[in-house]
Image (cartoon, rainbow, N blue to C red):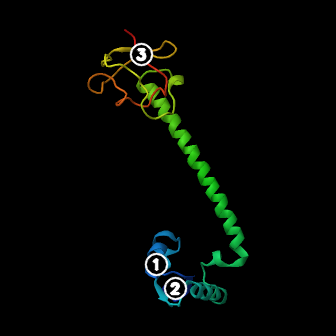
Amino acid sequence: MYRLYDDAGSLLYIGASHNPEQRWRDHRKEKLWRARMASMTVEWYSDRAAAESAEKEAIATEEPEYNVRETPKFAEACRSANATRRESIGQQMRTAETNANARRRRWLAWRFKVPADLVTAGVGVVWLLDASCRPGAPLVCPGGSTVVVKRSTGGGCSRRGAIGLLGDRSVRPAH
């Protein structure tokens, strides 16, 4: 079990860990109150259960400033808030991915001068062209739009070097 103190000797936090030095480093990186951390004391116990029991008792009697998570009064509220936060972060990540895909689709449509409705979010091999396709050659897209190939991957366009532009729709040379 370890205790963290500030410069004035005020108790900031009590925790239990098999590696208190690592927890010190973690707290120095993660906690908003890290600038106040000045010292640490460590007490060793025979096993994890004994350390956790001593930790709970010490938190209840010594009332460290930043141990609200272990206080029964707040424990359920914190678990609920953390679950809500995890759901919110997941939704934010999905939204960001959707927005990034939309921006990528708009850029690809602009860059390759194709109608935006042809561009999909799919990534991978998508221009299914034969080896006779050369840079500057016009292509016919689904719906009759024409695209000019800006560059080749070597011996013409190939599945291997194609960019993720038109999903699984086929594009054929116009000639």
First reached walking from the N terminus: tag 2 or tag 3: 2
Task: For the C terminus, give its image quadrant.
Answer: top left
Q: Quadrant of residue 124?
A: top left
| Callout 1 secondary element | helix
| Callout 2 secondary element | strand
Q: Position of residue 163 (x, y in %)?
A: 40, 30
- Mark 2, Cα crowd under 10 Å, few <14 / some 14-19 / many 20+, is many
Q: Evaluate if marks 2 and 1 touch, with contact meaning CB atoms under 8 Å apart.
A: yes
Q: Considering depth in this image, is 5 or 149 the residue closer to the camera?
A: 149
Q: Residue furthest left?
A: 154
Marking on residue 2: 2
First reached walking from the N terminus: tag 3 or tag 1: 1
Marking on residue 8: none
Q: Considering depth in this image, is 6 or 57 the residue closer to the camera?
A: 57
| Callout 3 secondary element | strand
Q: Residue at x 56, y 48 (%)?
A: 93
Instruction: Please state which of the two labelled residues, at mark 3 or mark 1, is closer to the viewer.
Output: 3
Q: Residue furthest top?
A: 175
Amino acid residing under circle 2: Tyr
Seen in the picture, residue 67 relative to 168 is either above or below; the reply is below
The residue pinned by badge 3 equals 172
Marking on residue 24: 1
Instruction: Please state which of the two labelled residues, at mark 2 or mark 3, is closer to the viewer.
Output: 3
Seen in the picture, residue 91 relative to 131 is either above or below; the reply is below
* Real-space CA distance between mark 3 and mark 1, rounded to the nearest whole angstrom: 62 Å
Q: Residue at x 67, y 63 (%)?
A: 81
Amino acid residing under circle 3: Arg
